[in-house]
Amino acid sequence: MILIIHSHGDGWSRAAVNYLVGLFGTVNRKMPKEAEMAEGVGLRSVAPVVLRGDVEATSALIDSLDFARKYTSGVLSFEEEDLPMSSKIKTMDDFENAVFPGFDANQYDCLWVEHRDKGRLELNFLIPNVELTTGRRLQPYFDRADRKRMDAFQTIINCELGLSDLHCPGKRQKLTRSRNLPKKELGLADSITKYLIEMHPKNREEVVELLTKKKYKIVRKTDKSISIKNPNGKRNIRLRGVIYEKNIQK
């Protein structure tokens, strides 16, 4: 299991809610247009399931806020196709305890929706950025402050439930970090790798295809790495790790 926090969070709740509970999902990370939906493009093979929370209440709460960032959303993505309900409940409970330390359940709202149409389990969450008892702004996740705690949450859950874990010694790193990369380029490399992990490419041809669709220009491929043109116009970015190798080993 890996935790992915989405970057969006401003605007109305409609797009986020439609993605979570709608019968149509993304195709190449984009929602199909109405004409495409009419032809069945993006139709989910398995309908979403609301596991916890009230869709309409969460949506109304988000739309009532006047904060710049109204909500936080993300997904717990599993390699496993499904889990027992008891494991899902434990995972949701432990995530909420990790992201809202010291908070009571009446102080926050968190909607949980299950997706299984991609051949793997995804537990999606949508959190209005407000503390319910005071109406004050509440930001559940700041990467610099919270990453270590959330990494620990992932490791504990994966070990306790016996799940596939990218952090376990038996799993090779999807991304090998280079100390020579500037902070901005390192952040981009991390972002690209998270995107690829979420898409679960079966081989390097699919990795190259996904990178190309995201408008990254491949400038070099070796048995152990892929280099892309730096979108900031500087030195090319070399991506190393098992997900970039010629023979992907999952």
Image: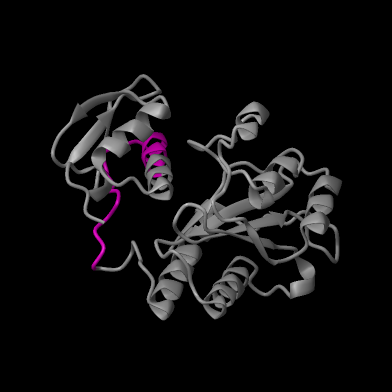
Residue at the left extreme, as displayed: 223
Determine the image quadrant of residue 192. Answer: top left
**Which residue is located at x 37 percent, y 49 percent?**
200
- Magenta span: chief secondary structure: loop
For residue 174: magenta?
yes
**Residue 97 seen in render:** yes
Residue 225 drawn at (x, y percent): 20, 39
- Whether 230 is drawn above or below 93: the answer is above
For residue 53: magenta?
no
Left or right: 60 in relation to 75? right
**Which residue is located at x 67 percent, y 43 percent?**
9
Left or right: 233 in relation to 125? left
Give 81 or 219, whichever is nearer the viewer. Answer: 81
Residue 174 drawn at (x, y percent): 29, 51
Determine the image quadrant of residue 171. Answer: bottom left
**Which residue is located at x 32 percent, y 23 percent?**
217
Left or right: 115 in relation to 227? right
- Whether 2 is drawn above or below 247: the answer is below
Which quadrant of the figure contains the N terminus? bottom left
- Whether 128 is drawn above or below 63: the answer is below
Give 104 or 159, whichever is nearer the viewer. Answer: 159
- Whether 226 is drawn above or below 199: the answer is above
Residue at the top extreme, as displayed: 233
Residue 222 drawn at (x, y percent): 14, 35
Which quadrant of the figure contains the C terminus? bottom left
Figure label count: 0
Span shown in magenta = 170-190
